Image (cartoon, helix red, strand yellow):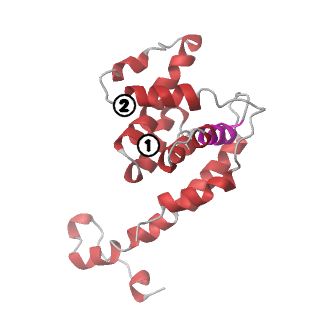
Amino acid sequence: MTDIDQRRATFTSFEESTAEDWAIIAPQLAVTQSFVPDRVIELLRALKTDHGGFPVDRLEHSLQTATRAERDGMDDEYVLCALLHDIGDTLSPYNHPDIAAGILKPFVSEANYFMVKNHGEFQGYYFWQHIGMDPNTRDRHRDSPYFDYVEEFCAKYDQTAFDADYRSNPLEHYEPLIRERLSPQS
């Protein structure tokens, strides 16, 4: 560690902070971001412990979604979004799309961010009628230029990824992609 890595700001409130304090703090953002790929991989592994009653565990669902997209020729950014779209399931099932979208926002296009953030409502089209919800809730996004994009993601990759017999790529296959896309840019 360098001296700057060991120093800390001295303020007790932001209002009291100085340029010198922020000169210490600002470089640490890249350090903190460098931990993100490992933390994301840990969160994905945690999905293995929860099936939520589904035919496959949540990790397998994520792997199937990514594998299907990859095998269909989608680009790396899209495949990463497919892999991480449900990463928030075990942290907060009711707003898991927001968690995944928050992780991905700095690294993906507006279309892919919108897809991840809103996939839950689009996915509802396939089953919400069975749980007393409106399956057409996604229609509130009809005016979005990304409506068809998210609709296709759910139709082709997300809602089909619950097949216990499907041979998906293992998480290790995607670790280089996660590390490349979520590491701080040099």
Amino acid under disc 2 = Tyr
Furthest residue in direction right, as rendered? 165
Q: Nearer the viewer, residue 16 or 152?
A: 152
* Amino acid marked by disc 1: Ala
Residue occupying the point 60% across, 51% down: 43
Q: Nearer the viewer, mark 1 or mark 2?
A: 2
Residue depicted at x 53% and y 48%: 80
Q: Is residue 58 magenta?
A: yes
Q: Residue 115 in the image: state x and y as whole percent.
A: 43, 35
Q: Nearer the viewer, residue 185 or 53?
A: 185
Task: Please indicate whether residue 65 sits to the left or right of residue 109 in the image.
Answer: right
Tell me where residue 76 appears, x and y as whole percent. 51, 50
Dot 1: within a 10 Å radius of its alpha carbon, few (fewer than 14), some, or many (20 or more) residues?
many
41 lies above or below 116? below
Q: SS of the residue at dot 1?
A: helix
The residue to which callout 2 is attached is: 146
Residue where numbered disc 1 is placed: 101
- Residue at image coords 39%, 68%: 29
The correct choice, above or below, for 127 with respect to 20 in the image is above
Residue extent of the magenta highlight: 57-67
Disc with the residue nearer the chain's start (1 vs 2): 1
**Left or right placement of residue 61 versus residue 20 in this view:** right
Give the x, y percent position of residue 153.
50, 31
| Residue 129, position as x, y percentages in the image | 55, 11
Residue 179 lies within the magenta run: no
Q: Residue at x 48, y 58 (%)?
A: 182
Q: Residues within 10 Å of mark 2 (few under 14, many from 20)?
A: some
Q: Disc 2 on helix, strand or loop?
A: loop
**Is 119 or 32 nearer to us in this picture?**
119
Please, which residue is most extreme toward the bottom here? 3
C-alpha separation, residue under disc 1 versus residue under disc 2: 15 Å
Q: Are the residues tagged 1 and 2 within 8 Å (C-beta)?
A: no
